[in-house]
Amino acid sequence: MNPTPPPPFRVKICGITRSADARAAVAAGADAIGLNFVVGSPRFLTTDQGAAVVADLPRAVLRVGVFVGTPAEEIQRVVGAVGLDAVQLHGHWPAETLATADPPGVCAALAGIPVIRATRLSAGVGRAALEGARDWVAEALALGHGPVLVLVDASPPTGAVAAALGGSGRTVDWRALRAAGGLPVPIGVAGGLHPDNVARAVTESGALAVDTASGVEAAPGIKDAAAMHRFVAAAREALSGSCS
């Protein structure tokens, strides 16, 4: 059995809307930033705004675009216009509406672009809690292009619209995530992470990467530099221990 490859990032600050916040995230030690292209989100960016946010960042920082139910052709256009390095598909499966659909075929249509697949734990116990993710990854791989990371996020309220699928402050059951076992790709954790709980999230879940948005904000889309520093420091210490 092949070993699990390393994740594309260790610490990601998502929902960045200002270039100053992007630079502060990098100064704090984040190795990835997320830009939200989901219309209706309080962290939504246009293509031009996204390009301006990342214009001055070091090339080593991973630029991730977040999408929900967006056609592959439009994602590819935004990737090229903004200069994104990876795409995060954040929609449901099965989708409650077409606007929240991100089927495995979208991943296959993005061949050549690294894809991060956000998912949620199901109500099942043990391995069953990640069965939907396993099926999605297997189908994407069979179609020729699997994700480079599965990011387990908190479940949104039933019927949530595309703009409300992330950044809610809800947390994941970290112990249930560990009990769900592994996947063919690395697993990261998101959902309600902040400087005071991220170390526990890593320890209890066994995740190899972490992602936060609202947990380091002064207001939706406005980041708190001190909180980002605290978050990254706590996350990196915990992640270094999990890999030792």
Image (tube, rainbow, N blue to C red):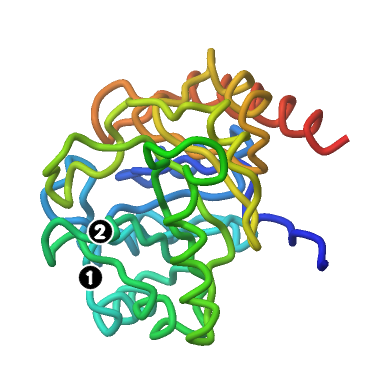
Look at mark 2 in the image and give the residue it sits on: 37
Nearest the camera: 219 or 70?
70
The answer to whether residue 27 is above or below residue 8 is above
Residue at image point 72% right, 26% down: 238
Left or right side of 4 for 112: left
Give coordinates of residue 24: x percent, y percent.
50, 35
Look at mark 1 in the image and give the residue it sits on: 70
Residue type (three-letter) at the residue carrying disc 1: Thr
Residue 6: assigned label? none
Determine the CA span between mark 1 and mark 2. 9 Å
Residue at image point 51% right, 60% down: 134
Left or right side of 116 for 169: left
The answer to whether residue 83 is above or below residue 6 is below
Local packing at callout 1 (Cα closer than 10 Å; few below 14, some 14-19, many 20+) is some
Cβ–Cβ below 8 Å for labels 1 and 2? yes
Secondary structure type for disc 2? loop
Nearest the camera: 220 or 187?
187
Residue type (three-letter) at the residue carrying disc 2: Phe
Residue at image point 27% right, 31% down: 168
Nearest the camera: 5 or 141?
141
The answer to whether residue 71 is above or below residue 217 is below
Question: Which-is-in-front pick, marks 1 and 2?
Answer: 1
Hey, which residue is sitting farthest right in the picture? Answer: 244
The answer to whether residue 50 is above or below residue 223 is below
Give coordinates of residue 220: x percent, y percent.
24, 31
User: Which of marks 2 and 1 precedes in the sequence?
Assistant: 2
Left or right side of 134 for 233: right
Local packing at callout 2 (Cα closer than 10 Å; few below 14, some 14-19, many 20+) is many
